[in-house]
Amino acid sequence: MATLEEKIEETRKLGLQVVKEIEEDRLMTLSVGPQHPGSGHFRFTIKVDGDYIVYCDPDPGYVHRGEEKMCEYRNVIQNIPHLERPVIHDSNNITYSYSLAVEDLMGIQVPRRGQFIRAIASELNRQVYTLYWLAIYGIFLGHSTMFMWPAGDRELFIDLLERLTGARVTHAYNIPGGVRNDMPEGFKQRCLDHIRYFEKRLKEYEDIFYNMPLFRQRTEGVAVLSKEDAVKLGVTGSVLRASGIPYDIRKVEPYDVYNEVDFKVQYMKTGDSFARSYVPFLDMKESCNIMRQLLDKMPESGEVRTKLQPNPKGPPGEAYRRVESGRGALGYHIVSDGTPRPYRVKISVGSFRNLLALPYLLVGNKLADMPAVYWSLNYWPVEADR
Amino acid sequence: MSTASGFIKAIESGSKHLVMRRFTLRYPEQKLRFVGDGYQFDPKKGVGIAGYRGRHILIHDKCTGCQLCAIACEGIAEAIGMVKVDENWKHNKKAIMPQIDYGKCVFCGLCVDACPFYALFMTNDYELSSFTKEHLIYTPQQLEVKPKYDGNVEIIITDRGATHG
Amino acid sequence: MASYIESFRFGEFVGSVLWLVFWILIIISLVGLPLIFIVLFYVPLPPLGDEPLTPYLFLTMVVDPTRTVPIAKYLIHTDLFRVAAFPGFTYAALFAAVTIFVERKFLAKMQLRYGPLYVGKIEGWLQLAADGLKLISKEIIIPAAADKPIFWAAPIAFVSVAAAAAALIPVAPGWVVADIDVGLVAVFAIFGFFPLIALLFSWASNSKYPFIGGLRALHQIIAFEIPFIISALSVVILAGTLNLTGIVESQIASYWFVFFLPISAFVFYLSSLAELERIPFDLPEAESEIVAGWITETSGMIYGLIQLGTYLKLYVLAALFVVLFLGGWSGPIIFPEEIIPGYTGEKIYNHVTLSAIFWFSVKTFGVIMLFLLPRGISPRIRIDILLHTGWYKLIVLSFINMFVALALIYGGILGPEGLLVR
C-alpha cells in the first residue's frame, strides 16, 4: 500500500487521474463556485483530504456569451464594442489584435502616428489590468491595504485613458485602420507626470507586499512549475516567464512599432507562486520605460486613421495575428469570404491556456494555498469563456 | 534578521501613508472636470476629436433623417430608432430624427462616427438616471438641449501624494 | 431632466410630523413612565435625611440640586451600576463601539481613502448606529439542517463570556465588578471557553466551510493559549499576587513591568492577536479561502452579536495588557481637588478616581491602536506557519523572560524590600 505522499506524487505525474484507493469518505468535496469570494465568476471543484488538496476539476463556461458567433452577424467595425467586453479592463489589447488581423486581411496600412498611439494605449491598458490583478491578489491573501493602493493608483491611468479615448473602461478605441481620435491637448505632459508619480508608488508596493515576510513564506516554493512542464502544458504570458523562459511576443514577433522600442524581457527562474506574482510587477516597471520611449519617438503630427468605406470588405482569405496582453498571447484567426461580415472568427486567449496548469498545480498543496496559486495563474474567467 | 527588517519596513511604509493626502473623489460634492465639449467626429477628415462620450446632442439644423446612425447602431446595441418630428425643415423632407434609448446604449460613439452631416455629437453629461425605463428614451427634442455640466476637480499630484483637487 | 420627483405638499408634511409627535406622546405616557416607576419601586433608595425616599420624591431630584448629588452618588455605588454601566458592560461596549469606528477611519487613512463619511455630519460618526439598525432589521436565516438550540445559544454565549471577562478588569482603585483573589487565573479560565463556542457554532451550522473554519479556530486558539499564559506568568512572578488590582499596585510601587519584561509583552501581544482572530491571524474567518469561516451562516443580529463579542474581547485583552504591563491606572494626578476653591458642600467627584480612569482609558486606547495596526500592513498567515510559531517560537521566548523575572526577584531588585521599590 503506497503512502499518501507517494500517491499524490503519482497523481501529479499522471495529470488528472483521481486516486481511487484513498477511502472516499475521507475526502471532502468543496465547490469553490461562482458564489465564493475567492474565485471570480468561475467554478472549480476540489476534493480535500484533511488540509491537502488531492483533486481539482475546473469548470469554465459560466460566462459564455458566444462572442465568436456574434462576430459573424456584424460587420467588421460593429464588432469592436462587443469584442472588447470579454476583458473589459484590458480592452485596448483585445481589440488591438483584432484590428491587426483585419488589417492583414484587407490590406490596410495604418499611419505612423496612429501606430504609436495604439502602442501607448496598449501599454496604459496593460498597467490598468496588472494593477487590478495585483489588487485582487492582495485581497485574496487577506491584505486589504494591497487591495486599496493599486485600485487607487489605477485611477491615474484610467484618467489618462479617459482623456484619450472618452470613456473610462469601455474604450472602443482601436478600430481596423488606426485609432478613432487623436490625442487631446496636454496629454503627453500629463502622461509623463503620472508615470513619474507611479514609479514612486511601485517602491511602496515592494515594501509592503513583496518584501513582507509573511507573503514570502506563503508563496515561495509553493506550486512550482518547472520549465519542461511549462512548455508541455502550453502556458503563456507571465506564467511562462516566471518559469524561466523569456518569451514575449513584443520581442519575438514585434507588431506595429515595437521593433523600435528598446526593452528587456523580464523573467524569473524559480517558477513558484512568488515568481508568478513578481513577474507582472516587473513588467509594470518595464512598461513605464516603454511608454516614455514611445512618447519620445512619436511623430509630432500626422494622421491617426486610414479612412475606410462605411462597410469595409476585402478579398476572401484568412489572417492570424497575436498580441501580448496582460495575460499572455491573445490571437485572432479570421476567415473572410469576401462579404463585409467575417465568416469565422476564432479568438485564442491566454487565460484558457493557463487554466490547464491549475489542476496540475493545486494537487498536493494545502487548502490555504488555493487562492494564492489560482490567482497567480493570471486567469480571467470572462475571457476564457468568451 | 531579514524577517524583522521586512516587518519594520512594512510598518514604516504603512505609517508613511498616514500623512499622505487621500485620493477619493467625493462625488457629488466634487465632480470631474473634462477637457473640451465631448466627443465629436469630422466626416471630411474621417477622424474623431477627443472628448468625453456622454449623452448625445442632436443639432436639428443639420440632421437630414438619413438613418445612418440607426443603421450603425443596429449591429451594436439597437438603441437608436427614427421617429417622426413635428418640424418643417428644408433638408429633412421625411421629418424623421433619431431617438436614443439610454437603457440600451453602450456609449461607444460609432453612431457619431457614422453621421456625415455634423449633426450628432456627444457631450459631457453622464448623469442620466431615472425612475422608470420609459424616461430613459430621449426624444429628438430632448436631445437638442445642450446640458449644463460644471466639473471642478481633476487629479493633481502634490508632494504628499496624489489627490483630486 | 429625465426623472420626475414627486411634488412637495405642505399638508402632507405637517400631517407626518403630527403623526410622529402623537406616537411619541403615546409611547412615553403609556409605556415609558410606568416602566420608570416599576423599576424605581424595586431599586433600593437611600433615606433622605429622615424620610424614606419614594419614587415620586426621587423624580424631584431633577429640580432640587441639593438632593441630586447624594442620590447620584448612592446610585453610582450600587451593584447594578457597576455591572451595567461602569466599569462593566456599558463602558466596555462604548470602547468596542469607538474601536470599530476608529478602526475603520484609521485603516481608511492608511489606505488613502475616507472611511464612513456621510452618516452624521462630522466624518460619519453615526455610522455604527446605522449599521446596528441595519443588522437588527435583517432577516435571520438558519440552515434547515442546522442544530437550532446551539445555533441560537452560541452567539449569546459568545457575548456573555466576553462580557464576563470584562467584569474582572480593574479600571480605578476600588472600581472593579468582581474583585477575586485569583483574578488572572479567572481571566484565563474564561478565555478557555472561546474555542469551545467557536467549535460548537461551526458544528451546529452543518455546512462545510464553517466546519473547516471551526477546526482552524480550535487549532489556532489552543496553540496560542500556552504562550499567553506563560507570558502573563512572568508578571505574576514579579508582582507576587494573582489579584489584578494587586498587580497594578505593585507597578505603582516600582516601575512599569514592560521595562523589565519586554519580550513577555511582545509575546503577550502576539498571542492576543491570535486569540482575537485578527489579521494576520484571521484564518478562522479567511474570506477568500473558506468564505467566512465559522461565521458563514450568520446573518442579521446574530452576526451583530458576534461582532460585538469580538470587539468586547478586544477591549478585554487591551485592558489586560495595560493592567499587566503598562501600570494600569498609574499616572500623575491631573484633576484638581475641587473645581470651585473653597466649596464646602458635598464633593461632586473624587479627583484620584477620575484621574485613574483618565489614564486607564488613554492607555487602553493606545494599546487598541497597536492592535489595529497589523490589519493595515500584513496579509494572512497560513495554518502551518501559525502553528509552528505558536508552539515552538513563542513558548521559547516566553520562557526566556520568565527566567529574567525569576532572576530579578532572587537578585533582590524587585519584590518586597527590593532595590527598585519606591
Image (cartoon, coloured by chain):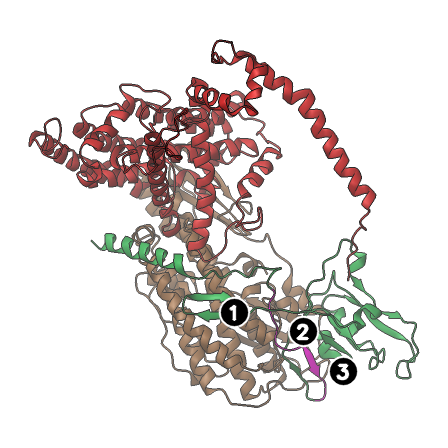
Q: Residues within 10 Å of mark 1 (few under 14, many from 20)?
A: some
Determine the main secondary structure of the stretch shown in magenta: loop
Q: Which quadrant of the figure contains the N terminus of chain C?
A: bottom right
Residue A280 shown left or right of residue C153 in the figure: left
Residue located beneath label 2 in the image: A342
Chain ID for green: B
Q: Nearer the viewer, residue A91 or A109?
A: A91
Q: Residues within 10 Å of mark 2 (few under 14, many from 20)?
A: many
State which quarter of the image contains the C terminus of chain C. Answer: top left
Residue in front for this viewpoint, C396 or A338: C396
Magenta span of residues: B31-44
Question: Could you classify mark 3 by the number of other residues whose Cα lies within 10 Å: few (under 14), some (14-19), or many (20 or more)?
Answer: some
- Sooner in the amino-acid sequence: mark 1 or mark 3: 3
Residue type (three-letter) at the residue carrying disc 3: Tyr
In the rendered view, would you say C59 is above or below A99?
Answer: above
Callouts 1 and 3 on one subunit? yes
Q: Is residue A326 visible?
A: no
* Label 2 with label 1: CB-CB less than 8 Å: no
> The disc numbered 1 marks a residue on which chain?
B
Q: Are marks 2 and 1 on the same chain?
A: no
Identify the residue shown where x is 38% and y is 22%.
C177
Residue A235's spot in the image, x, y percent? 43, 63
Amino acid beneath label 1? Ile
* Residue at figure coordinates x 58%, y 64% from the top left: A88
Check if residue B36 falls in the magenta segment.
Answer: yes
The chain coloured red carries which letter?
C
Q: SS at mark 1?
A: strand
